[in-house]
Amino acid sequence: MYKVFIADIAELAEEVTSVEIGYANPESDLISSLLKNTEATIAVLGRVSFDFSKRFMLDSTKAIADWSLLSPGHDDVYKTVIIEITNAGETQKYEFSNVFVISYLEQFDEQGGFFKLVMNLVRPIEVVIGGDAESPPDMKSDDDEERDNQRREIDTYTTIIKDESNQFKGNFGEMSADIDVESKGPIDPKTSEPKVPHVTATRVGDSRVTGIDDSGHQGIDGIYKCDPPPPAFIIVEAKYGKSNLGKTYADRNDKSKGKVKQMSDPWILGGDRIDKYFAIDSKDPIDRKKAAKEMQEFRLAWKKGLVQKELAKVDAQGNVTRTLL
């Protein structure tokens, strides 16, 4: 027995004949995992009723068809979908967010009609048994705590940051860029707006700036891993106010190589800039192993042309404007 609820669209039960849920999580080689989407696909099959006493089904299929025709940039393209599957008296509930339509098909013959709705999402599914989530909803990771600290600092210094030191302005810009990139994901090269469907971006490597008076970063400001790619990674340089990309030594340890523009390929690859960012010299063996893995993924993605370079300009209100480099 199935129940399918699509927020603001339809609630289906007896009309549904089958539901298929596929969750792909590739565990193959590194490049394959970078190139392949990590996503869930939901296929719902059901009957289209001709009985006007069951007009709800007719209205629902029309609403589903209308949903399937929305353009990718439309505000209503993403929906929450809840699926209940009952078998032998036990009900398993699947909750999905940010779901969009891949395809919708209706066919008819002398006996009646049927529909097939295929949906997709780019985030892992959450399984709920008996109505309760399997993990406590209020648990926060270290990254969540650090993001909260960043938001508090940004809120505290918004509008007054213009009167602070260059160090404070630089940290304000980096924290604002972190929040923007991780909440919006990479920008689309065609539109300069966040990609549709949504792509998550999670900071990797060097620890983030969480305080306005932190010492800050020398070199690369931020690298973020994307799910699903492309791009596999974003590398971002944050600039506050009217600051622009400048020229610095390609290799800080060998100044004879001359100066190059920030965020150019020679600058990113120059010297030990990437090694320093991923902190592979950490004294903690666990941190060192994690950093080495992340750096290997980044370097492989770079070779495959799967790294997107962005500039994040931040104003005194914490507004972030990102452009491709």
Image (cartoon, rainbow, N blue to C red):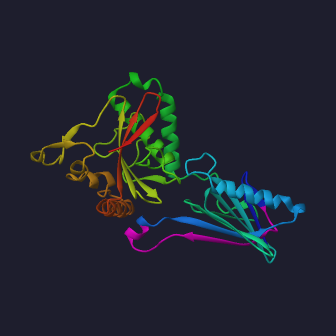
Compared across the picture, whether 136 is left or right of 57 comes to left
Quadrant position of the N terminus in the picture: bottom right
Q: Look at 19% across and 52% down and name the residue there.
A: 271
The furthest residue to the right: 53
Compared across the picture, whether 280 is left or right of 74 comes to left
Front residue (pair 240, 215): 240
The answer to whether residue 17 is magenta is yes
The image position of residue 106, as x and y in percent, is 70, 67
Front residue (pair 67, 196): 67
Quadrant position of the C terminus in the picture: top left
The furthest residue to the front: 110
Q: Look at 37% across and 32% down and name the residue there.
A: 240
Q: Which residues are magenta?
A: 12-33
Up-down: is 115 above or below 233? Answer: below
The image position of residue 274, as x and y in percent, is 28, 54
The image position of residue 23, as x and y in percent, is 57, 69
The furthest residue to the left: 256
Front residue (pair 277, 78): 78
Q: Look at 9% across and 46% down and name the residue there.
A: 256
The answer to whether residue 293 is magenta is no
- Total residue callouts: 0
The furthest residue to the top: 163
Up-down: is 241 above or below 136? Answer: above
The image position of residue 279, as x and y in percent, is 32, 54
Up-down: is 16 above or below 77? Answer: below
Q: Quadrant of residue 191?
A: top left
